[in-house]
Image: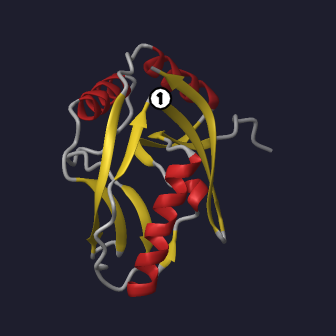
């Protein structure tokens, strides 16, 4: 019998209010009607800042210390476009213009996480909210812009299940 501490699958994210999640979910439904696929549940829609993977509690605590040291500046995201990544068959919502505090926040978090030894994705950060998986093609959707005031960062636990991922916010840092 293993005595190793259990691991948790976690990530850092921006988590919209329920009203914003519901708008994103409606966009997802509009896309599904055009291109098929599986929509993301409204309560799971978010914007990932850094995926951390399977961590032991001591590592989760270390991640929390990194975020504790970050100054979170409030900013506003304006989601005004829907895109498609054909390789992954993902429909996503994004912003035509990314406010400077977001890439600064991401770089600051990544630097702190790398100093702890985390392997962070080296691709340029592409802020997006996933709407649909397994879509057949790019949808034709020009949504009314969704303005999302951002005031916090969250640490989320992800549990994979046959019906999809289940997310739970386990810690929140506010501006």
Instruction: Determine the image quadrant of residue 56.
Output: top right
Question: Which of 137 and 111 lies nearest the eye of the viewer?
Answer: 137
Q: Residues within 10 Å of mark 1 (few under 14, many from 20)?
A: some
Name the residue that disc number 1 marks: 152
Instruction: Determine the image quadrant of residue 81.
Output: bottom left
On the image, the x and y values in percent for residue 86 come to 27, 76
Count of numbered circles in the view: 1
Question: Which of 146 and 120 lies nearest the eye of the viewer?
Answer: 146
Taking the image as drawn, is residue 84 in sight? Answer: yes
Residue name at image x 31 percent, y 79 percent: 139
Q: How is the image coloured?
A: secondary structure
On the image, the x and y values in percent for residue 145 come to 32, 55
Question: Which of 27 and 121 lies nearest the eye of the viewer?
Answer: 27
Quadrant showing the C terminus = top left
Using the image, determine if residue 144 lies above or below residue 58. below
Q: Is residue 120 left or right of residue 125?
A: right
Residue name at image x 30 percent, y 47 percent: 78
Using the image, determine if residue 142 lies above or below residue 124. below
On the image, the x and y values in percent for residue 12 come to 47, 37
Question: Which of 113 and 146 lies nearest the eye of the viewer?
Answer: 146
Instruction: Determine the image quadrant of residue 109.
Output: top left
Using the image, determine if residue 99 lies above or below residue 129. above
Residue name at image x 49 percent, y 68 percent: 26
């Amino acid at each position: 019998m293993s005595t190793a501490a259990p691991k948790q699958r976690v990530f850092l994210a921006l988590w919209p209010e329920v009203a914003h999640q519901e708008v994103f979910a409606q966009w997802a439904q509009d896309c599904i009607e055009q291109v098929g696929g599986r929509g993301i549940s409204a309560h799971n829609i978010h914007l990932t800042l850094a995926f951390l993977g399977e961590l032991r509690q001591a590592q989760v605590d270390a991640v929390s210390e990194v975020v504790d040291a970050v100054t979170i500046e409030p900013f506003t995201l304006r989601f005004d476009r829907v895109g498609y990544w054909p390789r992954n068959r993902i429909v996503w919502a994004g912003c035509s213009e990314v406010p400077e505090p977001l890439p600064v926040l991401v770089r600051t978090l990544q630097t702190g996480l790398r100093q702890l030894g985390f392997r962070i994705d080296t691709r340029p950060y592409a802020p997006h909210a996933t709407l649909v998986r397994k879509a057949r093609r790019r949808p034709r959707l020009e949504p009314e812009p969704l303005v999302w005031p951002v005031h916090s960062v969250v640490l989320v636990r992800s549990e994979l299940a046959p019906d999809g991922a289940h997310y739970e916010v386990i810690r929140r840092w506010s501006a």
